[in-house]
Amino acid sequence: MRIALDSLPFDPITLQTMVRDLAGAVDEGQIEIDRLRQIIREFQRARFGRRAETLEPDQLLLTLEAETEAFPVMAPLSPLIRETIGAAPTVKPLHRKALPEHLPRTDVTIVPDVTSCPSCGGALHDAGTTTSEMLDWVPASVRVVRINRPKCACRACGTLHQAPAPERIAEGCLATPGLIVHALTSRYCDHLPLYRQSQMLARHGVALSRSTLADWVKAAAWWLAPLRDQLMTHVCAGERVFADDTPLPILDPGRGRTKTGRLWAYTRDDRPFGGMAPPAVVFYATPDRTSSWPARHLESYRGVLQVDGYTGFEHLTRDGTVHLAACWAHTRRKFYELHQTGSPIATEALVQIRTLYDIEATLQGLPPDQRKTLREKRSRPRVEALELWLRQKLALLPSRARLAEAIRYALNRWGDLARFIEDGRIDLDTNPVERAIRPVTLGRKNALFAGSEGGANRWAIVASLIETAKLNGIEPFVWLRDVLTRMIDGYPAARLSELLPFP
């Protein structure tokens, strides 16, 4: 607001009105300054700060103003650091596990370099052996598999007989399933881009271009795509499914740059509520983030869908067959960003959310009915008190303040956040699907982008199988090599579900 100081009015009432307007403008400006400073601090933390969202022990002493029930004193989140200045150094005892029995052993015998006792000259006799073990590394090697097919001819009729050539993953492909699966696991499990694999093979004297490896990946993904469909059928059969998405840059040759696609992840994990079904994760790559994609992916799903704050999932609830459950971790994150700047209200909210997690830690693996009963008794009073407290604080805050935004984010989703109390199958957060996405983000960091929409789809197919195998404790390379070999040899399509990476 600009004021012409040379032409101020003399009327006191008019001057008072101008002062009030000026004070209001100053207040609004200060609120905007505080909001922008908070945004800068969040960017600084994202760029330079630590990733762990932990609280200091003394901050756990904060409680809500209206406490509903007594709760045991919580253990500190991080142990106190003992003062060690001046203390004598100690040797940490070894707790090394025995080396795995399945590893091959090579014996190396070191005999004494004497044939008689150096002390007295007496004869030496066997007195036992001291054995110790060390790990060794045998570098990978490339070999050529030569396929010989003898011909047999009949002299009577001149007919020539020969065994048919084995099927290959693609016509003219010179790679065995083992080498192709090595490329798949190196790319999508160990996050080695194809050009690096090409360089590694060159060191072994094998010249294979990146485009050749890409053709192998394309052929393998074609064979493995039906298995991803079988996995999605298994995921959609679950009573509760996690869903999330992450950016996936895709090369856009016509524009000379990348476009931002999405990689959608759908995870089934019934272990927290005692379910016996194997866990699984399925990925789908799309060119954008419109809500039509999850609606298409989850067209046959009926149950509880646990998601983050993305509003596109709300379209799935229109016919009443899908019910959404929100994520407390995303809600907590909003307050943690403000806690980092010293907001006592945000810190207090974090402490109360932490108590819900402490309760949940005692319910892992229990059946849904028991989880529901215990949550009604222990979690519901805290959730109701937290909602009331947040609404009281919101009424006292400027509407544009960052803390008000965090509180509105929570209150706008409160029904979905509190749904875990009434349904023992629901977890507090979507961490299972976020953990499944994390390896994909590592691969994205190394590869930078997918070469095309087809490449993004192949990424999603192979990542679905590899990450599901890892969830079930199955070695991806061994399993994929066996599966691809069977499929190439003519495994029945009606029995593909038997090949899924389930123990």
Image (tube, rainbow, N blue to C red):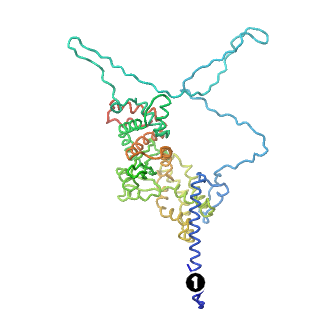
Q: What residue do we see at 36% from left, 31% from top?
A: 173
- Kindly indicate the quadrant of the structure image that contains residue 394: bottom right
Q: Position of residue 305 (x, y in %)?
A: 43, 53
Q: Is residue 37 above or below residue 27?
A: above
Of residue 337 and residue 362, the one placed in the foreground of this image is 337
Q: What residue do we see at 67% from left, 49% from top?
A: 79
For the N terminus, the quadrant is: bottom right
Residue kind at label 1, given as amino acid type: Ala
Q: In this view, does 323 lie above or below 34?
A: above
Of residue 339 and residue 454, the one placed in the foreground of this image is 454
Extreme residue in the left direction: 157
- Kindly indicate the quadrant of the structure image that contains residue 280: top left
Secondary element at tag 1 = loop
Of residue 299 and residue 86, the one placed in the foreground of this image is 86
Q: Badge 1 is on which residue?
A: 4
Q: Where is residue 464 in the image (x, y as percent from the top left)?
A: 43, 42
Q: What residue do we see at 60% from left, 91% from top?
A: 10
Circle 1 Cα neighbour tier, 10 Å, few/some/many (<14 / 14–19 / ≥20) = few
Extreme residue in the bottom direction: 11
Q: Position of residue 36 (x, y in %)?
A: 56, 65
Tell whether 278 sits left or right of 47.
left
Q: Where is residue 354 in the image (x, y as percent from the top left)?
A: 58, 55
- Kindly indicate the quadrant of the structure image that contains residue 168: top left
Of residue 9 and residue 88, the one placed in the foreground of this image is 9
